[in-house]
Amino acid sequence: MKPEDFAQLPLPPKALENLAQMGYTAMTPIQQQSLPVILQGRDIIAQAQTGSGKTAAFGIGLLEKINPRFFGVQGLILCPTRELATQVATELRKLARYLDNIKIVSICGGQPIGPQIGSLEHGAHIVIGTPGRLRDHLRKQTLNLESLHTLILDEADRMLDMGFEDDIRFIIGATPEKRQTLLFSATYPDTIEAMSAAYQFDPLRVSVESQHDDSTIEQAYITYKNQDKTETLAALLQHFAPEAAIIFCNTKQTCSDMVAALRNYGLKSLALHGDLEQRDRDQVLIRFSNGSCRYLFATDVAARGLDIDSVDLVINADLPADPAVYTHRIGRTGRAGRQGMAISLCSDRETYRLKRIEELQTQAIKALKPLASPSPDKVPEPAKMTTLCIAGGRKDKLRPGDILGALTASGELTGDAIGKINVTDFSAYVAIERAVSPRALELLKQGKIKGRSFKVRRL
Ligand code: AMP
């Protein structure tokens, strides 16, 4: 028997037959690594993206433990969005076809609560949903998690990005301490590690691809004459058209100068440096990580401890003096199995620095051919999203679900046009697709959020 055969697993013949009928002939790598352990009842923390087969990994494990004759919630799956919850529910229903009468209920925000209460009353074995709405049901006591044995956090990093941390804590607080907890996340920022430490027992770490594999980062450099530095940078951004790029400078003065200089080429960017007030720093980071700004200039000090997802391109506008700093900078791209690129600008007088850096790398840093001058006809598209800032936050008891609700209540906007929602103590930020952002701004200004009016502006 091959290691990827499902028949390796202690599953009943009916379950195996159903998998074969679904066309699942072999386990995917994440399934091979995690299913034997999940079936033993152990906690896992897994790095896995959509497309890896992660849903079946936790789904098969969960279904094996469900007792169909007991009508209480035995398994709970937390997802960041309604779209993902719906996908997970669809896959789980297919996987459960070999079992009789397993009730799988999906409970998400932005939908009427009445019918949800009805479905929960009828008894559900498995609940899949978004954290804000699940918390509402717990508060109303229309959801009881006292008999739960398996808790799954899907796309945990995204849930934290969307500001669901408090809701997740509340929900976990309502589950029995003795339970199996499976945590899936595309990235492992410190916040995820902390969550695992708080809520998991001796979890096994499962990772399909290593996160900092050198080979996923293509490294290159381009030489320029001193007076042409910003022009070279603008040409690079135009040529490679990255969705998101971090551009490192050695000083905060260069960061600010570059933001101004790029504007002349029609490129909008933001700068992150040590002099920013906390609130401005938050706003810059939020706008960059929610897709409202494509280019972020940063100094090494300001970028320390930055918690942002992988970017497509890292540019060294200045070469760092210390080769270790170079390695650290380029580690911001090519994460989580994605392909990344790092390009260094190197003046004709800096080639010695580049040599020293290259000695520390396991692969060569390629020379790029000279690029055409930036042209006003080929200005890259502006960022996809725009950020709206609401003058109310955690201290006003605002939650992401409330903002999502206010935006989608009239039915004019759908969840797809809405991106990340960040709620800080006194403000909340929501990313909206640029094209519909004027309408979203009107909806928020005219309507109410949680029954109250808030000042809203575009950043
Ligand atoms: P996911 O990563 O859970 O979003 O799954 C990605 C896709 O792969 C889904 O369409 C699944 O139906 C499918 N899939 C999951 N496991 C297998 C498998 N072992 N063989 C073939 N397809 C699979």
Image (cartoon, rainbow, N blue to C red):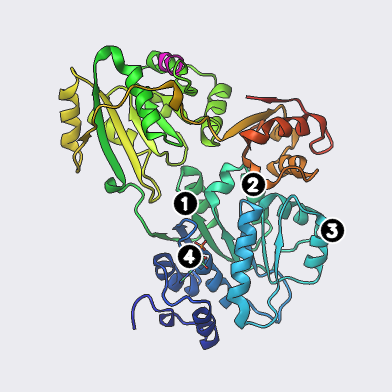
Q: Residues within 10 Å of mark 2 (few under 14, many from 20)?
A: few
Residue under label 4: 53
Q: Position of residue 258 (x, y in %)?
A: 41, 17
Q: CA distance from mark 4 to mark 2?
A: 23 Å
Residue drawn at 38 percent across, 38 percent down: 332
Quick check: 63 left or right of 269? right
Task: Please tell me whether residue 81 is drawn above or below residue 451 in the rendered image.
Answer: below
SS at mark 4?
loop
Residue under label 3: 114
In which image quadrant can residue 59 be found? bottom right
Q: CA distance from mark 3 to mark 1?
A: 34 Å
Q: Is mark 3 within 8 Å of ligand 1?
A: no
Q: CA distance from mark 2 to mark 1?
A: 20 Å
Tell me the kind of residue under disc 2.
Asp
Residue 373 marker: none
Quick check: 255 left or right of 143? left
Q: Which mark's residue is nearer the viewer, 2 or 1?
A: 2
Query: Are the residues tagged 2 and 3 within 8 Å (C-beta)?
Result: no
Q: Is residue 299 magenta?
A: no
Q: CA distance from mark 4 to mark 1?
A: 13 Å
Q: Which mark's residue is nearer the viewer, 4 or 1?
A: 4
Residue 416 marker: 2
Tell me the kind of residue under disc 1.
Ala
Residue drawn at 77 percent across, 34 percent down: 443
Q: Is residue 305 visible?
A: no
SS at mark 3?
helix
Q: Which is nearer the N-term, disc 4 or disc 1?
A: 4
Which residues make up the magenta segment?
A: 257-262
Q: Which mark's residue is nearer the viewer, 4 or 2?
A: 2
